[in-house]
Amino acid sequence: MAQILDGREVSAAIKETLKREVSAMVDAGMRPPHLVAILVGNDGGSMTYVGAKEKACHEVGFLGSVIRYDDTVTEAELLEKIDEINNDSQIDGLIVQLPLPSHIDENKVTLAISPAKDVDGFHDVNMGRLTKGADGVKPATPYGITLILKHYGIETAGKNVVVVGRSNIVGRPMSIMLSGPGETGNATVTVTHSRTVDLASYTRNADILVAAIGKPGFITGDMVKPGAVVIDVGTTRITDPSKKAGWRLSGDVDFASTEPVAGAITPVPGGVGPMTIAGLLANTLLARKAGIAARTA
Ligand code: NAP
């Protein structure tokens, strides 16, 4: 039976540490970190994620607020608001919940956020810094994954890691972090994707397998090396009449067939999701500290 890597528990422990830091900051007469989220439209998933982020901010003593727009908002209006927040010294972090309606260019919006306030770590400047191994914010989901690996003392150095998926928000930065130097790096990483031929021949050799595909139950137990660490990033809503909401979240890993084979595994829900929030909060505190340092330099 695999060890369950409990994202809720680890995230709660990280939040306690952050809460103590914020409390010390406030005791020293400083303003707590302030995170603003922009939410466009009424997508159920996006509303849930933003709500969870706002709640987590308040739990650790951050100021957290959400600016909501109808999905008819224009790109110009959104860019104007981002510019206003970029210039507001009372706000340390800004996230724009994706996806955005099709008439808005997501890349343009991502690049409009000041790199200093980009606590999702999606801006080209922050991605570039990550690639070069410089300090700074890191994309929240892969960052959260490194935090859970660290918490459970899972060694990455010298390990054979396979990342399935090459998106800019998960797979690609994950591969950069795990293959770079540092505490949760120094792995030998293979990045796979939809054009990979014979995917299972790669996944079966992985000591650590990260699945970020968006296809429920795609990775099955026969694709996993016995004893491997399996990180399931996938979160897809699938219809489930037995649930009150009529749906449930499914990961990219078929838990029933994989759990008996793996050495350790993250569940969905309760694995990577809470760790993403922990990563976002840690980035926001970092942005606040960098802001203080810049003003006192
Ligand atoms: P994405 O942008 O759609 O990327 C999916 C990746 O999977 C692509 O690189 C794609 O390859 C690859 N892929 C698709 N079909 C494949 C196949 N048959 N074999 C191998 N690779 C395949 O998705 P994403 O944003 O990375 O998100 C992935 C999943 O993670 C989604 O379920 C998302 O909801 C979830 N997620 C969860 C969190 C969290 O906090 N838990 C955060 C972010 C995302 P190509 O590049 O060749 O198309």
Image: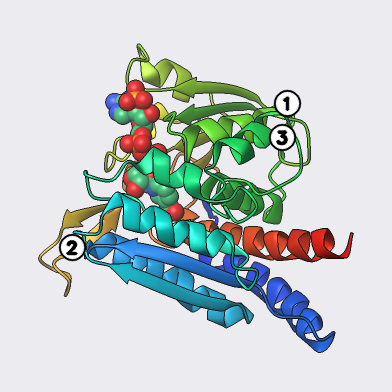
Mark 2 close to ligand 1, CB under 8 Å: no
The residue where tag 1 is placed is 158
**SS at badge 3:** loop
The residue where tag 2 is placed is 247
Q: Is residue 35 above or below residue 259?
A: below
* Cα distance in 3D space between marks 2 and 1: 40 Å
Label number found at residue 213: none
Three-letter code for the amino acid on which mark 1 is drawn: Gly
* Cα distance in 3D space between marks 3 and 1: 9 Å
Q: Pick whichever, 34 or 184, lies toward us.
A: 34
Q: Is residue 280 above or below residue 200?
A: below
Image quadrant of residue 131?
A: top right
Three-letter code for the amino acid on which mark 3 is drawn: Gly
Residue 79: x percent and y percent?
40, 53
Residue 211: x percent and y percent?
43, 37
Q: Are marks 3 and 2 in contact (CB under 8 Å)?
A: no
